[in-house]
Image (tube, grey):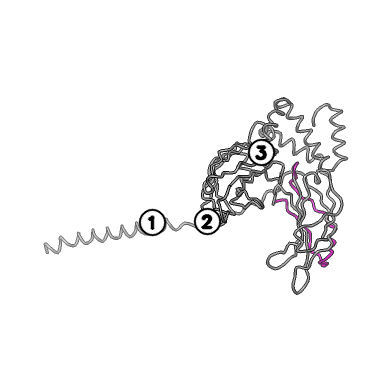
Amino acid sequence: MGCGGSKQPQQQQESKALAAEAGQENKQSEATLLPEKKEPEQKKAEEPKGPAVKVKIVGATGLRNADWVLTSEPYCAVQLFSPKPASRLQTKTHEDYKNPAWNTTLEVPGYTAGDALSITIKDKDLNLDDILGKVVLTDAQVKQGFTGELQLTETGGCPDAKIKVKVEAMGTAMEGVEKAVEAVKELVTGKESVEAEAAECRNVKVEIERAMNLRNADWVKTSEPYCIVELLGPKPESKAETKTDKENYKNPAWNTTLEVPGYTAGDALSITIKDKDLKSDDILGKVVLTDAQVKQGFTGELQLTETGGCADAKIKVEVDAMGTIAAKVEEAVEEIKKEVEEAIGGGPAVVESEKEATKSTGCCM
């Protein structure tokens, strides 16, 4: 009795302890059974800011047939070339593969001064759409307007392939906007300081320090690498380059500061390393700094592409931030600029009325 009586309370205590532990585990398991989280809805892409360019795609002539069995179904894609993928619009396909006549007007959004306009004709396929022809209207043509035929490139051997378009002039509208903005700038900061700052802002200071792990593109001797920097508007006139490094093809050290002219807000920056040759200069590597990196500034190493199989090829650069006083002024008057752009959205006639209103009131708005 004595031994049996002493074990029974002990067993009861052990049972209670086990039950308590089991209950605790149940609570923990319950605590971990949380309701499933709903995936956040993807935000819709923001509409491009800025007025729209009216482009009438009349038709094309002399296109090739890119299909083997049936015939091509050509359509035309239009995009502002800063580049601005969000501005892309396209026509419907056409049944006439050789001389399609779309007669379609597209309003391409997001125009800013300096934008070029890319036009590409493609064949609608189940998989990859073949290119039937391409052309780019320069920023000057977009600004002044253009009506007529343009010679197409990348036509697949059709030298007579052309496209007829009509692009409304953007110069008149944007001049009205710029004049209004300039008036606001003068009120905010004073004309002279803004002009001086704007002149300085047009040059992007880029220090090309060095590159690492480049390939040797020559068969007999060794590569003589140099570096090209260019604003991507595209803006060929902004092109600047370093000298060649004749001593170290693999890890060249230029330590050169280039001032790249012609910067406007939204520009990206292209950097290309090439080997100096007698004929064609081979590409050793490329990289593009985004418009955000140019605006905020960048210091560090960048991974290169098109390196000819050198996966570790990099370049070290320093780009001065372009978010200066002039940029801040632009930001401060952005809302006013939007209002002016909307006000002159009706074209030259509305712009003239805005000018008359300015004369009568004696102010910028």
**Residues tagged 3 and 2 counted as in contact (Cβ below 8 A):** no
Q: CA distance from mark 3 to mark 2?
A: 49 Å
Q: CA distance from mark 1 to mark 2?
A: 20 Å
Give left or right: position of 47 versus 17.
Answer: right
Residue, far bottom: 69
- Looking at the image, the residue that sits furthest to the left is 2
The amino acid marked with disc number 2 is Lys
Measured from the top left, where is residue 41 in percent x and y? 60, 54
- The kind of residue tagged 3 is Val
The disc placed on residue 260 is 3
Check residue 97 for magenta coloring. Answer: yes
Q: Tag 2 or tag 3, which sits nearer the N-term?
A: 2
Please state which of the two labelled residues, at mark 3 or mark 2, is closer to the viewer: 3
Query: Residue 225 at x, y = what percent?
Result: 58, 47
Dot 3: element: strand
Q: Nearer the viewer, mark 1 or mark 3?
A: 3
- Residue 212, given in percent of the width and then of the height, sits at 52, 47
Mark nearer the N terminus (1 vs 2): 1
Element assignment for label 1: helix
Q: Amino acid at mark 1?
A: Gln
Q: For the magenta stretch, what is the residue range? A: 86-114
Q: Residues within 10 Å of mark 2 (few under 14, many from 20)?
A: few
The residue carrying mark 2 is 37
Q: Earlier in the sequence, mark 1 or mark 3?
A: 1
Residue 312 highlighted magenta (yes or no):
no
Exactly how many numbered labels are in the figure?
A: 3
In front of the other: 6 or 142 = 142
Quadrant of the snapshot with the N terminus: bottom left
Mark 1 — residue? Answer: 28
Q: Nearer the viewer, residue 47 or 195?
A: 195
